[in-house]
Amino acid sequence: MTPFEITRGSSPVILGFPHTGTDVPPDIWADLNAEGYKLRDTDWHVHTLYGGVLPEVTTVRATFHRYCIDANRDPSGASLYPGQNTTGLVPRTDFDDQPLWSRKPDGKEIERRKALFHAPYHAALAAEIERVKEIHGIAVLYDCHSIRS
């Protein structure tokens, strides 16, 4: 499984899609519970919604599901929104506070997921930012999201 997809464009705009992926490797899928199998917190079709909006835009899309690891979280696990309803680097619950795992990932497993998914996605995003900056002198990153709540 490739953890990201890139479509290269010639404009200074890059669209990032950290939560549209639905791929879950079998070893991770086996540890989800019935609620986790629903993949509720997916940004369903957001990459399609933005498709064609800006001509010649670059896109970087995570192919893995956010339950594997959330590509939009700090790799340290620090909360992006302290005091608000949010999920962690590897979510333990969904946004309705429903448990996702029959067997929760431990620290070693989280580190493995950082290396397999999180770091490659961010490396691809960084490479595209540098490529676009080389061409235009600037790069504009727009991080595309939705949430069912």
Image (tube, rainbow, N blue to C red):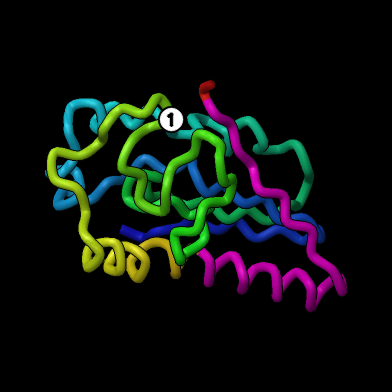
Left or right: 44 in relation to 81: left
Residue name at image x 37 percent, y 66 percent:
114
* Residue 107 screen position, x and y as percent: 25, 64
In terms of depth relative to the viewer, which is nearer, 96 or 146?
96
Most extreme residue toward the bottom is 134
Residue name at image x 27 percent, y 68 percent:
112
- In the rendered structure, does residue 50 fall within the stretch colored magenta? no
Residue carrying label 1 = 95
Left or right: 143 in relation to 116: right
* Residue 147 screen position, x and y as percent: 54, 29
* Residue 131 screen position, x and y as percent: 70, 74
Q: Please tell me whether mark 1 sits on a helix, a strand or a loop.
A: loop
**Magenta region:** 122-147
Query: Residue 119's quadrant in the figure?
Result: bottom left
Q: Is residue 122 above or below residue 4?
A: below
Most extreme residue toward the right is 137
Residue name at image x 51 percent, y 23 percent:
148
- In the rendered structure, does residue 142 fall within the stretch colored magenta? yes
Query: Residue 91's quadrant in the figure?
Result: top left
Identify residue type, mark 1.
Answer: Phe
Local packing at callout 1 (Cα closer than 10 Å; few below 14, some 14-19, many 20+) is some
Residue name at image x 44 percent, y 42 percent:
87
Query: Residue 60's quadrant in the figure?
Result: bottom right
* Residue 74 screen position, x and y as percent: 52, 61
In terms of depth relative to the viewer, which is nearer, 147 or 93?
93
